[in-house]
Amino acid sequence: MTQTIAPRVRTLVLLLLAAACALLAAAGPAAAHAALTGSDPREGAVVDRAPAQVSLTFSESVSMDDDSLRVLDPKGKRVDDGKPSGTGGTTYSVKLHAGLPDGTYTVTYQVVSADSHPVAGAYTFSVGAPSETTVTVSGQGAGGGFVGALYGVGRYVSYAAFAVLVGGAAFVLACWPRGSGVRVVQRVVVSGWLALTAATLLLLLLRGSYTGSGKVADVFDLGLLGEVLQTKSGAALVSRLLLLAAAALFIAVLFGAYDKREDEERRDLTFGLAVGGSVVAAGLAATWAMSEHASVGLQAGLAMPVDVVHLLAVATWFGGLTALLVALYRGPSDTPVPALAVRRFSRIAFGSVIALVVTGTYQSWRQLGSWTAFTDTRYGQLLLVKIGLVAVLVGVAFFSRRWTAQLAEAVPAAAGVARGAAKASGKASGKASGKTAVKTGSTTASKAASKTGSTTASKAASKSGSTTASKTASPGQASGAAKGSGGSQRAAQLARQRAAVDAARQKRQRDADPNRFGLRRSVLAEAGVAVVLLVVTTVLTQTEPGRTEEEAKAAGTSSSVGSAPSTGAVTLDMPFDTGSQNGKGVLRVELDPARVGANDLHLYVERPDGTAFDIPEVKVALTLKAKDIGPLPVAPDHITTGHWSASGVQIPMAGDWEVAVTVRTSDIDQVTLSKNAQIG
């Protein structure tokens, strides 16, 4: 039976590994999770005068240092002051040197988004007229290279190890308490703890270089490590290490004091272990929720606990499957997995599936935002793959439940038979005469040898019998010899031989059980699909959410290096004078893409010398007089000095629209300006 199983197992394992490797190869470097949704000057723009500053607006809050935002002249020389300032965490600006000559300037940025992923990009704008530039931007995105690849491996290992640690411990505690004494199950759980600890330490050391230069030498920079510890991601990794110390104590009790107690005493300890283990597991899951997708965007306060439940459900299912699979294939023959334990896990797995469906539906809505994002974004496409894998996994689990219902209980363990044989041999050695003992020992040993095919045992029995017989002179002497050490050793040897034979017979009977054989195959297939599902889930955590990607497309920009400039925008320059002191300036209105539907509106206010400045109030209204539509009011938000913006401005139809802007420079001084713009 074993020879029949082995080729199938090897083939299935190889196929699963190939699928996992293909997914890993397609994953690539981590995608940007904060998209560049606006810039001033905008990408590809040609302005008459050099701006006083450059501003970038992202889809979510980001963090920067002094070198994160740079502006380079046509010769590659920095022309910014190197001190970015931010507003609200989503918009950052850097001041430029005065008197910049005409030419093409390059803006480069490398920031860290709120969900812990690095974002890099570059674009150009021109002053006066475009010119040649010597600036070349590396095609390697943030988080790439050897350090990025190693960081990605650490992420995959940490997710898998968390599932094995939490799910394996839950399987022992909730489904199979006697499994706490099974060595292979202990190794599974302990290996999960060791792998998660090692991966967390690796991520902590790589974090600074991963989000910065990407150089291997920076991995050992203690100063950089200190900066990482002050970030949200660094705090999450340190918290994970502290919780792993508590998990080590839990494992020690589970496989130590808990295993040594009787069934009644175990019940008293089970509740405490269940509560403590649940707290530690939830804390470990929270270290991901507090630093990745769930911590930013819509309804973050609700998304984080939902993400914790989602991770715990995945771990319970995947880790429990791993422990069950190892116990079925590698467990000792004297401690088989009982049908009751499999039925308990089947019910827990069913509950995990329900939790996954509910929490996954909510997270999908939150990260996608529209039905079209399922097919139009990479995140949505990966999510469809994940949904398909979950459906396959549920189908395989159905067959596992069917085999579980038909599974027969295993026969009594071989250890009990061995103890009975040893007890019977002990009684016989105390009562039998020396001659009987010798004969019985020789005959039994010979039979045992013939059953096991052991030539050595047969020779030993013959030699032992003949030697004892030659030395036997009388029944009294024989009785004394039987009561001696030789008889006890032979009885123990016989007991061990009988136990070995019975254990081999029990294993053959167990493997020959068609129900158990079917369960082993279905659990193996279920675990294999779960491995691929875990890989896809990890790739999803490194992929730009569909909602963010669609927002970037709608804004007409891209977060990647070398993206094409947006087209179709309308720019209107309106000089104004409210009659008050400092009431003169120039108002520039940009409407992008100037088409029917949603548009982005940007307002820039500058003094006559070109420097940006703020005014108390600015209002916008759009009117299509030919169709008697409007005025449609627009309330832009203040972004930074001299810059206002409004997203999603709806223009219902094409035509010659009047754009009216009211500028107020003091409590009583204001003026309304208007210009027409062709839309559509």
Image (spheres, rainbow, N blue to C red):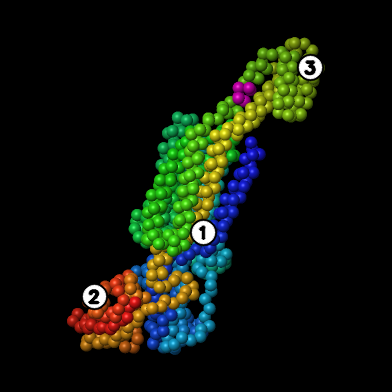
Which numbered disc flags the more N-terminal residue, 3 or 2? 3
In the image, residue 419 lies in the stretch drawn in magenta: yes
**Separation (CA) of disc 3 from disc 2:** 121 Å
Which is nearer the eye, 653 or 189?
Answer: 653
Mark 2 secondary-structure assignment: strand
- Residue 208 visible? The answer is no
127 lies left or right of 416: left
**Mark 1 highlights which residue?**
203
**Mark 2 highlights which residue?**
629
Q: Which residues are magenta?
A: 417-422
- Amino acid at pointer 1: Leu
- Amino acid at pointer 2: Ile
Residue 491: quadrant of the picture? top right
- Amino acid at pointer 3: Ala
Image quarter hosting the N terminus: top right
In percent of the image, x 56 and y 54: which residue is there? 19
Q: Nearer the viewer, mark 1 or mark 2?
A: 2
- Relative vertical location of residue 297 with respect to residue 581 in this rendering, above or below: above
Q: Position of residue 501 (x, y in %)?
A: 66, 28
